Amino acid sequence: MNAAARARVLLVDDEPAQRRGLARALVRDFDVLTAEDGPAALGLLATTRVEAVLLDLAMPRMSGAEVLEHIKARYPDVEVVVMAGHGEVDAAVAAVRAGAYGFVMKPVDPEAAASTAVERAIERRRLLASVRALEERVEEHEQLGEVITSSAAMQDAYRKALGVAAVSAPILLVGERGTGKELVARAVHRRGPRAAERFVAVDCSALPEPRADEELFGGGRGASPDERAGGGLIEAADKGTLFLDEVSALPLAAQARLLRVLTHGEIPGAGGEPRRVDVRVIASTCADLRERAAAGQLREDLVYRLGVIVIELPPLRRRREDIALLASHYLNRCARRHGRDVKRFGPEAARLLREYAWPGNARELESAVEHAVIAARGEAILPVDLPASVSGRSGPERRPPRDALVLPAALGELPYAEAKERAVDAFDQIYVRRLLQRTGNNLSEAARQAGMDRSNFRRLKKKVASRGDEEPGKAGTDVEDAEAAESAELADAAQDGDDAG
């Protein structure tokens, strides 16, 4: 089955014999409709969805060029392949310029020409449809402030968050900085019944402790007497959503008042009388709230109240399938913002993005891509355009990396064979160390990436470690660490026995 199997194709030809022959050939791979002239073809298109049209240019009543013009005006996503005689080459070229995918020459070889041309036209149509769908999805997510992800773990967390958007219970979003907690909170607000009301975001870690109570619950400087008796940022979010980012940073006094908001929907009012508020609270944290509570830094009852619904957002290193998707999204957005004609990542830059740990998560990735877009000198982003922390290159002093292959000048004083042996030893040490670092000292994975049998790679590693002992300061240290870690891997030892057998 080819990629265009069972797509619906309309064959338009006024010659009955050729129409029947082409239909017999095309029906092997496609659902085929036929029409004897232009008006009949347009009538079928008005009632039946097709993906491609195989169209004869020379027909009575309505020429193929006229039919093509009608199709492209009314059904622009339908691909058209035209059939032309040898005297109609100019007309066929004009048809391609008018929007046809391509043309085949008559007499048509049904197998080699028509089927292949139609199949490729349908593949192009489906590819363009996929690109449009992805662009629409990204655009919709940008407009709604939603998460762009293909990770199953992130999609599960997102679905869970949106699944409780309609209720008013507090939500606690747990995750490292830069994992998109505010983005998820805004999506929950937009999908819930409070979408028409305000979304108020508060960075609790940025609130000065002496004024945190005033900022949240009212009475801040510059406020009118009525405003000082009101609810500050919490009252500003009345009927809407209050997002408390890094909630564990709130002072204890503010925590007590927040607990009253959560349990009774009350804030201090004029004359000390409580004032009612209706606010949906979404909090976030990158800390363990129970540990904070055990240390006396957070009220335990507040932890219970905030954690009615807990949703954990995975870090980027646990959803590496999202790196390329997010990086492309950030590239397009940053290129538009800065007016740069940067369109893609080069292969090596893309590899560096995939392999970097991203401790700052999506926020760090966006910053790195913006840096690269500004630094790029062509359409493609190269490793040199990425921040040094991502590319691994040294700083301004341009010192070589710790494991760069730098050959001592003394090698030039040795005989060639001995100098070569020492240089090869240095390469082996650097190669093995970097491979073990990249694979987390996993021998099986390191051997696979090296393209070696596991037992042979193990012998190379032992040789490198022994060479490292002979020369202090050489690259043997990390390899020795791998040896120590390996001593506990009984299963690996057993596997080695199998390999040796």
Image (tube, helix red, strand yellow):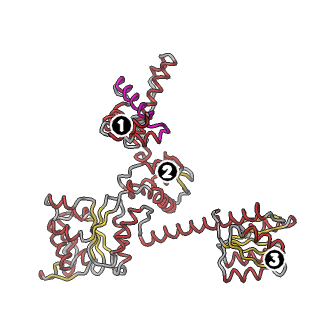
> Can residue 450 be found in the magenta stretch?
yes
Label 1 secondary element: helix
| Residue 422: quadrant of the picture | top left
The percent coordinates of residue 387 (x first, y second) are: 43, 48
Left or right: 357 with respect to 14?
left
Residue marked by disc 2: 350
State how far apart marks 3 and 2 are (Cα). Answer: 50 Å
Rendered residue at 25%/81% (across/down): 278
Rendered residue at 16%/81% (across/down): 269
Q: Amino acid at mark 3?
A: Ser
Q: Amino acid at mark 2?
A: Ala
State how far apart marks 1 and 3 are (Cα). Answer: 77 Å
Give the number of the disc on residue 63: 3
Query: Residue extending furthest front?
Result: 501
Label 3 secondary element: loop
Q: Decide which of 451, 164 is in the foreground and name it.
A: 451
Where does the N terminus fall, quadrant-wise? bottom right
Residue marked by disc 1: 493
The percent coordinates of residue 29 (x first, y second) are: 68, 67
State how far apart marks 1 and 2 are (Cα). Answer: 36 Å
Left or right: 55 with respect to 266?
right
The percent coordinates of residue 126 (x first, y second) are: 61, 67
Asked whether the viewer can see residue 168, the reply is yes
Looking at the picture, does residue 293 appear above or below residue 69?
A: above
The percent coordinates of residue 224 (x first, y second) are: 21, 79
> Can residue 439 be found in the magenta stretch?
no
Label 2 secondary element: helix
Q: Earlier in the sequence, mark 3 or mark 2?
A: 3
Rendered residue at 29%/81% (across/down): 239
